Image (spheres, grey):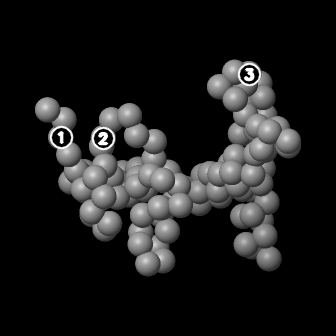
Amino acid sequence: MTDKYLCFSCEKEISNTGKSFIFDVDYSDNPCAENSGHCSEECFYRSTGRTKELRDLLHRKSLRDYFAAKAMQGDWAAQTEDTGYYSPQSSDVILDNAAELYYRMADAMLRAREK
């Protein structure tokens, strides 16, 4: 029997296997990222009682990483068949170049904050 967990805020059932999670949490009315169709990573860790792991994860994550992740999310969310998209067959070179671009964007955002 598989363990069942409920999201700590929306009480939606979540599973710790075969689920993809996102890093950002929408703190408006509902801290779950319902627009993505998945509970947030924070909801998962809190609802499963793994708060120490959540603290460790958040401690390792820098503002630069956060900005890079946001740039990646925006890029991937904007993809269409007309404009192109990443596929499971995308080469490592293509994905490495994209990752470098996201971190360049993050660095630009950090510089803009200093102004």
| SS at circle 2 | loop
Q: Residue furthest front?
A: 81
The kind of residue tagged 1 is Asp
Q: Is mark 3 in CB contact (under 8 Å) with mark 1?
A: no
> Is 31 on the left-hand or right-hand side of 12?
right
Q: Residue at x 75, y 51 (%)?
A: 78
| Residue for badge 3 | 91
Q: Which mark is residue 3?
A: 1
Q: Which mark is residue 16?
A: 2
- Of the two numbered discs 3 and 1 on the same chain, state the one appearing first in sequence: 1
Q: Where is residue 5 shown, x and y percent of the image?
A: 22, 50
Q: Return the residue nearer the eye: 8 or 23.
A: 8
- Of the two numbered discs 2 and 1 on the same chain, state the one appearing first in sequence: 1
Q: Is mark 3 in CB contact (under 8 Å) with mark 2?
A: no
Q: Residue at x 78, y 70 (%)?
A: 112
Q: Quadrant of residue 49?
A: bottom left
> Is 115 on the left-hand or right-hand side of 9?
right
Q: Quadrant of residue 40?
A: bottom left
